[in-house]
Amino acid sequence: MLYRLAVLTVILLLIAMASTAHAQGTATLSGEVKDAYGSVIPAADIIATNNATGAEVTDTTDAVGNYHLTLEPGTYTVTVEASGFEAATASDVEVMAGQTVVRDFSLELGAVTTSIVVVGSRAEPRSVTESTVPVDVIRTEDFTSQGSRDLATQLRTVVPSFNINTQPISDAATVVRPANLRNLAPDHTLILVNGKRRHRAAVITWLGNGIADGSQGPDISTIPSIAVRQLEVLRDGAAAQYGSDAIAGVMNFQLKNAPSGGSLEFQTGAHLDANPGDPATCGSGIIGDIKHSCNGIGGHGQNLSVAGNVGLPMGEDGFLNLSMEYGTADPTNRAIQRNDAQGIIDAGNTNLRNTAQVWGSPRINHDLKLFANFGKLFENNWQFYGHSNYASRKVTGGFYFRNPHTRGGVFRGPKVNGLPTLLVGDRVWAETAPESRTPPPGREPGAGGCPIVPIIDNVPDPDALAAVEADPDCFTLYSRFPGGFTPQFGGDLIDYSLVTGLRGFADNGFTWDASAGIGTSEIDQFIFDTVNASLGYDTPTSFRPGIYRVSGAEATWPSMATPSSPTRRTSGPSARPSGSRTSRTSAPPSTASSPGGWN
């Protein structure tokens, strides 16, 4: 026992002697960190770097702004950093063994970062911190850090109260998606590019009792995100300055204007969770004239895009900034097989697609977006400026499944003895029906008599169906399309514009601005895998419903003002868009009720 106590005592003495020797071989650096007003700064970082070895020792100030560093003897560079303050550095701080050196620091407030905005101001461009109403400034970095390349989708994640969705089975909104700011209609938000009004899209939205019904806003998705330098969003007070079409607010897209440099971006991706369906049930080899498009079957929504931006000089004081984006996107499918379709399959009819109806995002092909921004400053303080764009894409989406037994006007006939029947076309009755028509010679009014084809347990009566098919005066579209059909609807979009102007800056502070712009949006619609039952048995299966087109022009006339004038507009008074228009409302083709409409 005494032996163990003696050994422990010796060990403790050795530790104490080593600690004393180490303390005598090190130095201490301590002090206090305050701001310019004498207030202590807690949680400030202290970094002491040995000038000879480069070794660093760090510490953080405590709740009362004090720090304490234990250092090897030598000469150090001490840096103090704190959030919101300018960093302070002390060079050649010499510490000696066994010595305590006191060094206090005073930090200056850091410079406040401001953003220069144009939207919402009748004066010179000014710092956003001087605005009387909130102005959101969205930078390029907010776009590049996202997984989507589509500008409208990117804005949804960074702009509060901005909403846009990819809705399945949404008719013409598949091609041009309506966007809402502050839960108001798309054309209640004024869209500007470099302070100039953007032309409207060709689609008048009509989705059925929604806030967007009857609206016609610009198509934001035609702007490549790589072309945007910053986005300014003004909400409160926008209508007071810009009129009734800015009730929801103003979004001003400022384009990149660098005369040099550039960037290149490549992006691809896909969805892992999907219902791929069965590709064997679509495409070639399907019985019937409609081959059942494979759009949305067997894919995972894979997308690919490439974008580039380059700045070029135009003389000594000019620039040409070019942006390009090209991409494609396969459709997605979140559907399961419909119960009515599965019931028909279980009854032995294998001419249906799996899945019969697709629920997901549409297919987008050849999505091309080009944008140019240019400007030139002359010696007389005149500035020539402008921007131009061209965009095109093809979008294809699906409609609801048309059941081969129950689709009205195509397959569904009247109930007979409580049983559903197929709709049978009777050429004799059509020629002799007493509807102010004179029957052909030898025919009585209302003559006819095609067999009735009842449907029992999801199967048309085979004998009655064979009798209809054998009679040259009778027909049913079921014979051509035994698996029903799912129409595929979309459009080819073309969008282009040109805005150019001239502004001057005088030495006495007067400015003037004059500009003109034109823009066109066009959608050539198509629909296939469908029928027009009024054309009878020989109906085509693909159609071109028509072209939506809107063309607009805008001009701003020369205006002069001083920076102190309370009524000055930085871009001059803006005229309302004008021009011829041939657009039509986009009533959903699937719900068209007029005779002779496609289904």
Image (cartoon, rainbow, N blue to C red):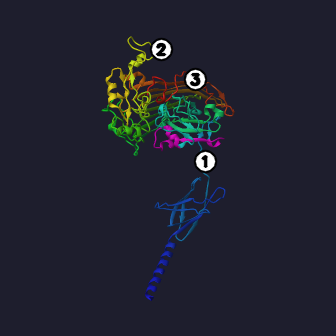
Circle 1 — which element? loop
Judged left or right of residue 286, residue 236 is right
Tag 2 residue: 436
Upstream in the sequence, badge 1 or badge 3? 1
The location of residue 588, given as percent across then percent down, is: 49, 30
Quarter of the figure that contains the C terminus: top left
Q: Tag 2: Cα neighbours inside 10 Å, few (<14), some, or many (≥20)?
A: few
Q: Are marks 1 and 3 in contact (CB under 8 Å)?
A: no
**Cα separation between marks 2 and 1:** 84 Å
Query: In this view of the protein, which residue sits in the foreground, 477 or 69?
Result: 477
Given residues 466 and 225, the one toward you in this image is 466
Indicate which label's residue lies in the foreground, 1 or 3. 3
Q: Rounded to the nearest whole Å, what is the CA distance between mark 1 and mark 3?
A: 44 Å
- Relative placement, left or right, of 375 versus 426 is right
Q: What stretch of residues is rendered in magenta?
A: 128-157
For label 3, count other residues whose C-alpha is less than 10 Å away and answer few (under 14), some (14-19) or many (20+): few
Of circles 2 and 1, the one toward us is 2
Q: Quadrant of residue 534?
A: top left
Placement of the N terminus among the 4 image quadrants: bottom left
Q: Residue at x 44, y 12 (%)?
A: 438
Q: Quadrant of residue 67?
A: bottom right
> Looking at the picture, which amino acid does disc 3 mark?
Ser
Name the spot of residue 27 as percent of width and height, x first: 53, 68
The residue furthest left is 285
Instruction: Please tell me which residue lies in front, 456 or 248.
Output: 456
Name the residue at the top extreme: 441
Q: Secondary structure at mark 2?
A: loop
Outermost residue on the bottom side: it is: 2
Label disc, if present, on residue 578 of the rendered structure: 3
The residue type indicated by label 1 comes to: Val
- The residue to which callout 1 is attached is 112
